[in-house]
Image: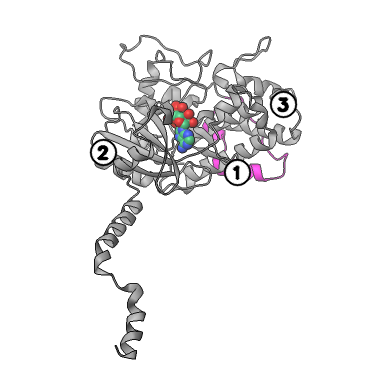
Amino acid sequence: MSKSKNFFDKLIKPFKINSSKEGQNEEDLEKIAQQEQKQFSFETLVAATKDFNPHHKLGEGGFGPVYKGKLDDGREIAVKKLSHSSNQGKKEFQNEAKLLARVQHRNVVNLLGYCAHGAEKLLVYEYVSNESLDKLLFKSNRKEELDWKRRYEIIGGVARGLLYLHEDSHNCIIHRDIKASNILLDEKWVPKIADFGMARLFPEDQTHVNTRVAGTNGYMAPEYVMHGHLSVKADVFSFGVLILELISGQRNSSFSLHNLDAQNLLDWAYKLYKRGKSLEIMDPALAPSAVPEQVAMCVQLGLLCTQSDPQLRPTMSRVVVLMSKKLGNLEEPTRPGIPGSRYRRSRRPPGFSSSHGTSGDSDSRTSESTFTNTASASASASTSALAPDPHGKRPMQG
Ligand SMILES: Nc1ncnc2c1ncn2[C@@H]1O[C@H](COP(=O)(O)OP(=O)(O)OP(=O)(O)O)[C@@H](O)[C@H]1O
């Protein structure tokens, strides 16, 4: 072989496809293309979860069971098997999931991809290792681990995640179900908002109002419960409830303090605030770590976010600005709205019963009985001029 031929061969070697490896390369390209599409094969998910082994089950929410899994490349994942109640077609599901997989933020659980296999629809999320906030805040004896610094950072992180969903993601996403159990914490206690975009994956059809995605006890903005008015301000309200829960360590939906002249957590916070005693709302577990000025500012912020009039509530961008500012510049909150409870699809005849109070209901999905005008409110949420997009894609204009 001549010198120049040798030189030429060396030059093109990296670009040459060895015929014996040609098939392999094609496979690799296919794999890359699949990853780009964010599509997972069903077999991959079966292998990752050991055939959806019950031991791998992390829990079961309103949309179906969630399994922990491990991909071949070592990544840990959480696979949500959507229950068959989603009546969305395969193509539509794939399109929506593909869009949602583009939503990427440090404070939002990353949707790695999806899988549509026969009737099965699955979502593949990054695995978030440190429990959901409700388990730490309300249920465990690990409450002390949530010192003030962590709680303050959680408030800030959720605010930034929501701001991203409302204003900075490709399509504006109204979450509709901000609550402690939808905030997951990673190993560094970074909060991540879970379950965003579910309204897009469980669309309402002509005959059914999918009230599952409508919200949860004690977190729902009154105008949404009563009149079906859906806007980003409904999320702001739920965020405000979350702030007050983080400070008090009390669940709003099951708030009870004897001898207190208050109907619910928000009412109690407002009364204390008016008397200049905001700090009395504080979870005793916070006593050693609290920074009083920050706690007082956050109580005020929680109250601003839960004001009855949605117009008066700050946008999430304002919340983020307020949190980064020097303390003491907040406006006076007006009276909080009465939070509503979840309402669900019901087979009962209209007018059977009505309740949307906050008393005694827990955050679990057992309150099937709540129904009536609120269901029609949800229906109007999908047609209301204030809610131009029933799937929570766009915020209320103006
Ligand atoms: N990405 C994830 N990483 C780790 N655990 C997760 C992840 N997603 C969900 N989980 C866990 O799986 C369980 C079920 O979650 P899911 O979001 O389906 O329901 P939920 O939050 O309990 O209720 P809801 O449907 O009302 O939101 C919960 O314990 C949750 O903490």
User: Which stretch is magenta?
Assistant: 308-336
Q: Nearer the viewer, residue 33 or 6?
A: 6
- The Cα atoms of the two marked residues, 1 and 3, are separated by 21 Å
* Quadrant assignment for the N terminus: bottom left
Going from N to C along the chain, the mark reached first, 1 or 3, is 3
How was the colour assigned to the protein in this rendering? one colour
Q: Which residue is mark 1?
A: 320
State the image quarter where residue 282 is shown.
top right
**Numbered tag placed on residue 278 in the rendering:** 3
Residue 120 spot, x, y in % from top left = 28, 34
Residue 242 spot, x, y in % from top left = 57, 29
Residue type pointed to by label 1: Val
- The Cα atoms of the two marked residues, 1 and 2, are separated by 41 Å
2 or 3: mark nearer the eye: 2
Residue type pointed to by label 3: Ser
State the image quarter where residue 323 is shown.
top right
Give the residue at x 33% y 90%.
4
Residue 275 falls left or right of residue 318:
right
**Numbered tag placed on residue 117 in the rendering:** 2
Q: Are marks 1 and 2 in contact (CB under 8 Å)?
A: no
Q: From the viewer's perspective, is residue 223 above or below residue 152?
A: above
Q: Nearer the viewer, residue 75 or 334?
A: 75
Q: Are marks 2 and 3 in contact (CB under 8 Å)?
A: no
Which element is circle 3 on? helix
